[in-house]
Image: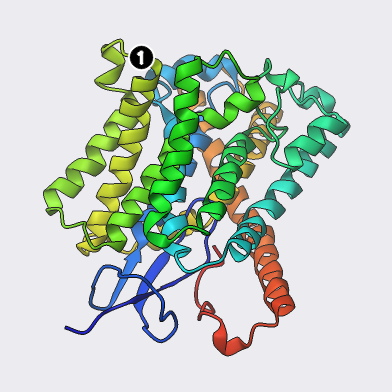
Amino acid sequence: MRRRRLLLTGILSNHGTDLRLARNPQNFPMTPPVPPTSGQLHLRGIQYLRAIAALMVAYFHSLEQIPAYTPYFERYLGGRLNLASGVDIFFVISGFIMLVTNRNGTPGKFVVRRLIRIVPLYWILTVLLVLLAIWLPAQFRTTAVSATAIAKSLLFIPYLNPGHDGEIWPLLVPGWTLNLEMFFYAVFALALFVPARLRVAAVGLVLGSLVLLRVVTGGHAMAPELLFYTDTRLLEFWLGMLIAQLLINDSLHLPRGVCIALLLCGLVMLLTGFPVDWLGVSHLTHDIASNILPAGAIILGMVCLEKRGSVGNHPWLHWLGDASYSIYLTHLFSWGAARFAWHALGLEHEGFGYAVGFYAFGMLLVVAGAGLVNTAVETPVTRLLQRLTERRRRVPPAALPNIAQQTPH
């Protein structure tokens, strides 16, 4: 039987992409064995999950925009769900995508591509936040601007933020996940020096050792900034890599019912904590059982469904996935604009109807604002920097993957 290989095409965004696996044995002669398939495997489901995760986090941050609406939000509008766990889905997706699309890459190219994809929009929005905080300090009471805070935020260095009760958050609060992402990228870049068959084990050893260090010391022997790098969520990156390795090895052959059960049970456990929250387990066990494993189950279930051809094409959800990085980084600006507009229009009245109207209006601004930023800033800047780096390397056009029709993520 003739040996089959797949060409991985597409450029990643922060936490994933619309990924195509297309046969092309000429372009990557050194590609290790990958799942045999006829035609192409479009990982649309990963793109959809990115959209859902970003919207979960955006909706979560609507909680205290207008305090009078908080009781309605918590009681009737899903506020008691663990919506912040969208970041757990992001982290598993990140580990999955990094392994699937960089099996033949070099550490240098990997780092450059990640910096191009992550840094520009984050820096632009961080600088915008600083300028707005200086111009309208009354509207940004929890934003503690200083030269040190600006430098550490821009360089992805964790620090105790005095504006948020000493939480280890950068100026642009959602950027704390990027600090953890950047650390994972550094570990993954080093793992690219290791033979492909050992990379999952190597990354797992490093990340697992850091989490174990936190468990053994109880977090008391390290400064909070260093303790940040022992977060149990590091295991989610490794879990994503493990799922990717199973896909590469063609080991995902689950029945459709099992795939759906994994996806739905993972989502229910992630959002509700059931039944782990009732068991009184340790902090580590709780994190693993109610966050890490459910997030992994969601990704595993979706990838298996995709492999079976059971995930349809939904352009609107795909578009939201494209814009998910913009949603994630801009949603606090959008909620601030929604709160300001709601007050200016004289609609800040107590009542269930007003609460529903505000949250619907705010989410509409979140999506519209992210779409605008993605179209006018994120995509053009990413493409420009990609072209500049490709030109600087002087790579002949024939040697480049065919990405003309791919999304710049």
Q: In percent of the image, x 41 and y 39: which residue is there?
A: 236
Above or below, 81 against 208 in this view is above
Q: Is residue 316 visible?
A: no
Residue 170 percent location from the top left of the image: 70, 32
The residue positioned 41% from the left and 61% from the top of the image is 196
Furthest-top residue in this view: 280
Which residue position holds label 1? Answer: 282
Image quadrant assignment for residue 310: bottom left
Query: Residue 365 or 88: which is nearer the viewer?
Result: 88
User: Which is nearer the eye, 193 or 275?
Assistant: 193
Q: Nearer the viewer, residue 54 or 266?
A: 266
Quarter of the picture holding the C terminus: bottom right
Q: Position of residue 322 (x, y in %)?
A: 51, 58
Up-down: is 34 above or below 115? below
**x and y, in percent, of residue 23 in the image:** 33, 80
In the rendered structure, the answer to whether residue 304 lies left or right of residue 31 reads left
Q: Amino acid at mark 1?
A: Ser
Could you tell me which quadrant the N terminus lies in? Answer: bottom left
Check disc 1: other Cα within 10 Å, few if <14, some if 14-19, many if 20+: few
